[in-house]
Image: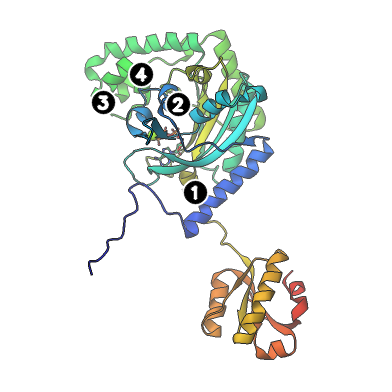
Amino acid sequence: MARIETPRRVRGTQDIFGEEQRRFAHVLATFERVRRLYCFGRVDLPVFEATEVFARSIGETTDVVSKEMYTFPDRGGDSLTLRPEFTAGIARAFLTEGWQQYAPLKVTTSGAVFRYERPQKGRYRQFHQIDAEILGAPEPAADVELLVMADQLLRELGIADGVTLQLNTLGDAETREAWRAGLVAHFEAHRGELSEDSLTRLDKNPMRILDSKDPRDRPIADAAPDIDAYLTDEARAFFDAVTAGLDAAGVAWTRNARLVRGLDYYRHTAFEFVTDRLGAQGTVLAGGRYDGLVESLGGAPTAGVGWAAGVERLAMLLEEPAASTIDAVVVPMGAAAEARALGLVAALRRAGFAIDMAYKGKMKQRLAKADALGARYALILGDDELASDQIQVKRLADGVQQVHPLDAVAEALV
Ligand code: ATP
Ligand code: MG
């Protein structure tokens, strides 16, 4: 018979198991707790959208839209795209589901997102994000709330040390236009020294030259004018209100005047939480204000601000999470005990105890399994115990073993 080949896991995807899964789950559980503390609602959205949702909002010239999207025609011939991020889908739902009535709308979501990228440590083709957004709040207080929330999340995950909040402003529309013109003039004067990529950016998206990693671009990018000289009074007041809010909340930040967002709809606040512990994949959480986004999808002008973080990158930074524990493992010896144990296990689980059953192998192996599961107790049931309606309760931490009445075993576990 021909050998059947096992299908392979698709490049850039992950099967998350064991300790990795516990880290992953810990990030999501912590996010869920922090979400409640900040009174954000939870939304769950489709994994795919009409391609235009992303193409129109994220922008055709970005890496994500120009080369990273999983786009395909469905059987009806519509062009669909697996979500590469959450913000565009939330803005689409805001419009199609009439969520304007809830503005200001504070929501979070999480789940798988898809980008066709070169896989490496901390970079996958299917990865996971947690995401928080506020739609319909033009005030700097919304930016502050989201930043303080992000900071608290990192603190509760125990990874805030060594992570820096880098903050910048992109100003209002007027500021941005003037700064853009200043940048173009500066880069035009150094056209001959720029990398090929940056020459393309110069035509389509000149701000992106500022965060170019190409060494040929760095000296020119570093010498480019900061936005500060172009800030309108309103834009400056907005940024001052954000930084004052962070100071009042005790959230440390540093100014990074080179931090930009290439897309036209970004305004005012742009930020990244950055660590040096993940090599080139150092950005763990990123976001900003996107007051032009909803309009780009055909809606009325609507303020928006939000952030997203990679769950895998946060999980990698965690200290080893506490191993999972359970209350007891039931160890029946012999057929009669096994039958009785089924009822006992069911009753204890219904009473809220985490119980596993070790029904195979020698006593020693079964106790080893109980240990490996992190059980506090082993409950040993043999013919002698059955005959007297009793059970052996063995505390695994110190091996102390006592006999208990079978119908009162729950009392021995608390
Ligand atoms: P990068 O510069 O690392 O490509 P990005 O600017 O594309 O990041 P965002 O679009 O801002 O990232 O996404 C928010 C967060 O999602 C990032 O800060 C990062 O933690 C995570 N992330 C982005 N791309 C990937 C990926 N391919 N695999 C795993 N995590 C990712
Ligand atoms: Mg990217």
Residue 391 seen in this snapshot:
yes
- Among the two numbered marks 3 and 1 on one chain, the one whose residue lies closer to the N terminus: 3
Q: CA distance from mark 3 to mark 1?
A: 34 Å
Q: CA distance from mark 2 to mark 1?
A: 30 Å
> Which element is circle 4 on?
loop
Q: For this rendering, which residue is in front, 266 or 216?
A: 266
Asked if the residue at tag 2 contacts the one at tag 3, i.e. Cβ–Cβ closer than 8 Å, the answer is no
Q: CA distance from mark 4 to mark 2?
A: 20 Å
Amino acid carrying label 4: it is Asn
- At which x and y percent is residue 110? 53, 40
Whether ligand 1 has any atom under 8 Å from the Cβ at mark 4 is answered as no
Q: Nearer the viewer, mark 4 or mark 3?
A: 4
Residue that carries the numbered disc 1 in the rendered image: 315
Residue that carries the numbered disc 2 in the rendered image: 53
- At which x and y percent is residue 161? 54, 43
Q: Nearer the viewer, mark 4 or mark 2?
A: 2
Residue that carries the numbered disc 3 in the rendered image: 216
Residue that carries the numbered disc 4 in the rendered image: 205
Amino acid carrying label 1: it is Ala
Amino acid carrying label 2: it is Val
- Among the two numbered marks 1 and 4 on one chain, the one whose residue lies closer to the N terminus: 4
Q: Quadrant of ligand 1?
A: top left
> Which element is circle 3 on?
loop
Q: CA distance from mark 1 to mark 4?
A: 33 Å
Q: Is residue 342 above or below residue 250?
A: below
Asked if the residue at tag 1 contacts the one at tag 2, i.e. Cβ–Cβ closer than 8 Å, the answer is no
